[in-house]
Image (cartoon, rainbow, N blue to C red):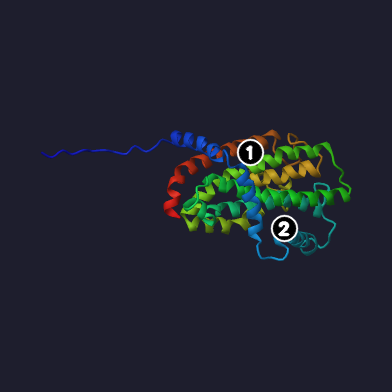
Amino acid sequence: MNISVNTKIKKPSIWARMKEGLLTIPREHKGFGKQTLMLAKDDLINTYKGAIIGPGWAVMKPLFQLFVYWFAFTVGLRGGATRQEMGVPFFIFLMVGFLPWCFMSDVISAGSKCIRSNRQFVNKISFPVSCIMTYTTLSKIYVHFFLFSLSYLYLVLAGYMPSIYNLQLLIYAPLMFLFFWGLTWSLAPMSAFSKDFESFITTIMSGLFWLSGATYNSYNLDSEAVRTILLFNPMTFFCNGYRKSLICQHWFYEGFKGGPAHPLWENGIFLLELAAVLILGIFNYARLKKRLPDVL
């Protein structure tokens, strides 16, 4: 007598994966705080291991890029160094917008390949995979704080005294960390599964720079359609946010000439994007985590 059994493996629902990821990530970080901080420091050191000035290159590279962009836009393209944006000298305008861009680009580039670069933690060592994304992002925060300190000192010497508006950075900086930390939960597992995806991220980075608003005032563009589209760019949100906090004497709920009809739209759009990135990151991490050892 033949007995046929038709069994189907029921796949977890989207909500089940979300719940799993939401519980897994905090659980994985529990008890690994000290190790994560130490690995963030080691990651920064190992990135520039063998160089004479070591992690100093993390500062030298963006400073050189800043000089090149300043020279190109003020001397090369504009025929003089007296150009102003948002009522301040262009170099200062560019420097403040360049600060968040350096952090964002470093996190996207390093975060997208952090699992593949640290496969030993996945295959051989009992270490939470989500902590890999955390210490990679933290290592870039160290560099950001140092660059910010240098830039803030320059602003003070240039006559831009500390003000109450600077306190807004206590909002923008943590939100920036949270957004791009959550983004790595999607980018890192997907890059581990596909080198093509990792190459795609590398390819689009230069384009993202020109779309970020780091080199221009996104509120002052001629095309209203382009201005509206850039409201949906989280990179532009942080470049503008740092300028509001450091040089423009604007609160985050105040608008600029040429900006959105209602200034809170910009903040509302970003909060929706933040929620979407975190939800998608949790879902992707929960979906791909168990398959990572086999792939690597």
Which residue lies at the image location 43% right of the left edge and 48% below the top edge? 291
The label nearer to you, 2 versus 1, is: 2
Question: In the rendering, which numbered label is found on residue 95?
Answer: none
Q: In the rendered view, does 167 fall on the left or right side of 226?
A: right
Please tell me which residue lies in front, 30 or 238.
30
Q: The C terminus appears in which quarter of the rendering? A: bottom left
Residue 41 visible, this angle: yes
Rendered residue at 73%/57% (across/down): 59
Q: Secondary structure at mark 1?
A: helix
> Eyeballing the image, is 28 above or below 44?
above
**Which residue, given by chain and number where applicable, does mark 1 sit on?**
270
Q: In the displayed orientation, state which residue is furthest to the left.
A: 1
The residue that mark 2 highlights is 62
Mark 2 and mark 1: Cα distance apart in space: 26 Å
Task: Specify which label sits upstream in the sequence, 2 or 1.
Answer: 2
Against 49, is 266 above or below?
A: above
Q: Residues within 10 Å of mark 2 (few under 14, many from 20)?
A: some
Q: Amino acid at mark 2?
A: Pro
Q: Nearer the viewer, residue 18 or 92?
A: 18
- Closer to the camera in the image, 246 or 182: 182
Q: Which class describes the residues within 10 Å of circle 1: few (<14), some (14-19), or many (20+)? A: many
Say which amino acid is labelled 1. Phe
The x and y percentages for residue 289 are: 46, 45
Check the picture and name the quadrant holding the N terminus. top left
Q: Where's residue 45, x and y in %?
A: 66, 57
Q: Are marks 2 and 1 in contact (CB under 8 Å)?
A: no
Please give the name of the residue rendered at 72% of the width and 66% of the height, measured from the top-left corner.
52
At mark 2, the secondary structure is: helix
